[in-house]
Amino acid sequence: MQHASHLADARINYAQAAMHLASCFLLADQPDPAMEHFHAALDQDTPGGIEPHLPLLIEEAERCAAHGDHREAIQRWQDITALLGAATPPWIYHHLSAAYTANQSGFGGTEIENSLWGDCSKHAILAWLHRCLQPALYLEIGVDEGVSLACATGPAIGVDPRPELQLSVALPSTARIVASSSDAFFADHASQLLHPAPELAFIDGMHLFEFALRDLIHTEQHMAPWGMVVIDDIYPCHPAQARRRRRTGSWTGDVWKLLPVLREHRPDLTLLCLNAHTTGLLLIAGLDAANSQLAAVAAQAVRHYRPIAEPPPAVLERHGAIPSDHPLVRELLQLLRRARQQRLDPAAVQALLAPLRPRITTAEQQHCGQARQLSLRRCVLPDPTAA
């Protein structure tokens, strides 16, 4: 008992020291190490959490905005959301939105750091998925300019915390936008608005691993068993694009970490990685709204993966990706449509998809190391009526 007490005291002392050191780094205008120490302290379940240090974090974000450094202000407000997580209040996102609007200088990075590649536009693939699946309801996390939401062919709900979006396209009359963070949406609105259950969802919100993980956990809880979830940004094209604190125009953040977590903890899911332009797409099927495994390991997974700064070479070279027009994609869609027609439950859908999974593994092995070369070929998505 005495040993346990000493250990608990040591953890508290370490956390308090890490918080103090983080504040010192922040005041020294070194936000990167500051965030590392803040997160290290929070991982120890620091008494009081980040709340005692919020005034300083907010003051520094406001200072950057006041000095006209809106690019850094975006990062500082995003840092606060990363520390608060699901508890981030709306007004923090409003400041983040205002910083984005005020930033006219982009995010920097060299030409190589901002390079993008892939075989088929992600928006072309999304539009094709809509035509093939004709979902009764489409859910989108992260609307931005509205290009992906405009792909919807039927009832659609887009969720974005920024109160004023600069849409670059007109949205269909059947689409609506809920101005809310995804965490608040699932807590306060999803049970009323997600009827019928979404049959297609696209997650492209905050480009941080833990946000994408929470979005997937919450989305699956509302999906139809025959539905599909699509994840953007799983393949950064350069290590700089995968930084948690954005320093490039092209930015995936560390969403790539989601895939190894799914492979380890959700072997029941059918995962299909596409070599899509710009930064790959992950198709997820075999969903089970009652499965709580991801939620159970989420905190542990975040603590393990968050400190990893750069994606491994296999991620940068898109090992595991197959061509976006591969016949297996069409077969997957056919099976999901059959599952919808038969109104199968999650176990039956997973059984229906099971024979496809070893063939997906074979296709991944066949195309391993060829993603860049195959990006140069013309990608032809099949006729939706044939899918």
Image (tube, rainbow, N blue to C red):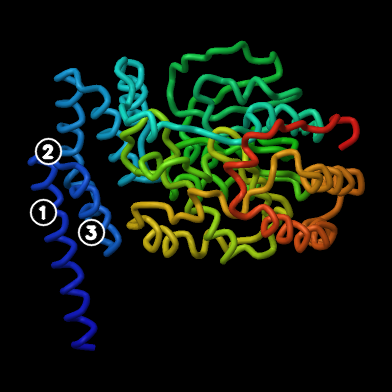
Q: Is residue 158 above or below residue 306?
A: above
- Residue at point 60%, 32% (across, down): 140
Q: Amino acid at mark 3?
A: Ala
- Residue at point 71%, 60% (across, down): 361
Q: CA distance from mark 1 to mark 3?
A: 10 Å
The image quarter in which residue 93 lies: top left
Label 2 or label 1, whichever comes before in sequence order: 1
User: SS of the residue at dot 2?
Assistant: loop
Q: Amino acid at mark 1?
A: His
Label 2 or label 3, whichever comes before in sequence order: 2
Q: Is residue 138 in sight in this rendering?
A: yes
Q: Position of residue 40 (x, y in %)?
A: 25, 59
**Mark closer to the observer (2, 3):** 2
- Say the numbered circle drawn on residue 20: 1
Residue holding disc 3: 41
Taking the image as shown, residue 142 lies to the left or right of residue 24, namely: right
Q: CA distance from mark 2 to mark 1?
A: 14 Å
> For the image shown, how many numbered marks are present on the structure?
3
- Say the numbered circle drawn on residue 3: none
Q: Is residue 189 above or below residue 84?
A: above
- Residue at point 86%, 53% (across, down): 344
Q: Amino acid at mark 2?
A: Asp
Q: Position of residue 200 (x, y in %)?
A: 71, 38
